[in-house]
Amino acid sequence: MHDAEKPDEPTAATDPVTTIPNLGPASAAAFARAGIHTAQTLRDLGADAGYLRLLQSGTAPHFIGYYVLVMGLQGRPWNDCKGDEKKALRQRYDALKTSYNASQEKGRSDLEAALDMFGVIDPRP
């Protein structure tokens, strides 16, 4: 049997979230609750949209979780984030969390919250 014919081995499109560096079983469970079941889906969403999905699914916001995700998607160890880069990520995280919190207060749908986060729709009065 050729390698391509092995039926139960994951492929790049079906690799679990845990194939991304820094993400273990607890992260995989949180992403699954958010409807993200594969590493490719998370890569396609990117760190900000993926993290927003975590928040929307009930995961409590935490800066370390956010930058661990960012570093993992870059293929870097979680503790590789330092100095100015970490400060910049903190600003991104704070903006993401603020946008999420504001969308919850406005009673927006998840889609509206995501579009608002990216500046695609006008804010509600």
Image (cartoon, rainbow, N blue to C red):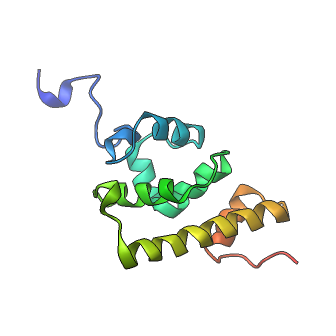
Residue placed most toward the observer, 29 or 6: 29
| Residue 80 appears left or right of 36 | left
Residue 54 in percent (x, y) is at 59, 49
Q: Where is residue 5 in the image (x, y as percent from the top left)?
A: 19, 26
Residue 57 in the image: state x and y as whole percent: 66, 45
Residue 73 vs residue 66: left or right?
Answer: left
- On the rendered image, what quadrant is the C terminus found in? bottom right
Decide if residue 14 is in sight here. Answer: no
Locate residue 77: give its quadrant. Answer: bottom left
Q: Is residue 70 left or right of residue 33?
A: left
Residue at point 63% right, 52% down?
A: 55
Residue located at (29% from left, 43% from top): 12
Q: Can residue 19 be seen in this view?
A: yes
- Residues 73 and 118: in front is 73
Q: Between residue 51 and residue 83, name the one nearer to us.
A: 83
Q: Which residue is drawn at 67% across and 51% down?
A: 56
Quick one: which residue is furthest to the left in this view? 2
Q: Residue at x 65, y 76 (%)?
A: 120
Quadrant for the N terminus in the image: top left
Determine whether 28 is above or below 56 in the image: above
Residue 78 position, x and y percent, is: 35, 55
Left or right relative to 54: residue 79: left
